[in-house]
């Protein structure tokens, strides 16, 4: 093997490493971005679930109050 072949192989390996490294960083950033957006959606969903739970509790309470008022009327 002569020096030209070795230098060419080293340069090719360096560019290949650089390409893989750049691609990996970009992919990692994209995954982090998507994960952040998903967390925001999950937080919104959880907020809706909590609000519905409180609303259902309040409706049940109001239904009980209406029942008691009807019993008093009769």
Image (cartoon, grey):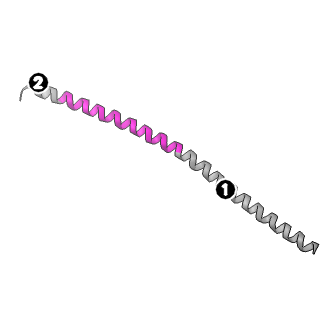
Q: Residue at x 79, y 65 (%)?
A: 61
Which one is closest to the eye, mark 2 or mark 1?
1
Query: Are the residues tagged 2 and 1 within 8 Å (C-beta)?
Result: no
Q: How many marks overall?
A: 2
Inspect the magenta stretch and tell me whether residue 69 lies in it: no
Residue linked to disc 2: 4
Residue linked to disc 1: 50
Q: Residue at x 57, y 50 (%)?
A: 42
- Give residue 67's quadrant in the image: bottom right
Along the viewing direction, whichever of 25 and 49 lies nearer the viewer: 49
**Position of residue 38 measured from the top left corner of the image (x, y, whole percent):** 52, 46
Which circle's residue, 2 or 1, is located before the other in the chain?
Answer: 2
**Position of residue 32 measured from the top left corner of the image (x, y, whole percent):** 46, 41
Q: Which residues are magenta?
A: 10-37
- Secondary element under disc 2, as helix, strand or loop, is helix
Q: Residue at x 53, y 42 (%)?
A: 37
């Amino acid at each position: 093997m002569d020096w030209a072949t070795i230098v060419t192989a080293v340069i090719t390996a360096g560019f290949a490493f650089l390409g893989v490294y750049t691609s990996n960083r970009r992919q990692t950033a994209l995954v982090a971005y998507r994960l952040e957006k998903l967390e925001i959606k999950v937080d919104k969903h959880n907020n809706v679930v909590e609000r519905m739970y409180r609303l259902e509790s309040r409706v049940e309470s109001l239904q009980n109050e209406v029942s008691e008022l009807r019993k008093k009327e009769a």
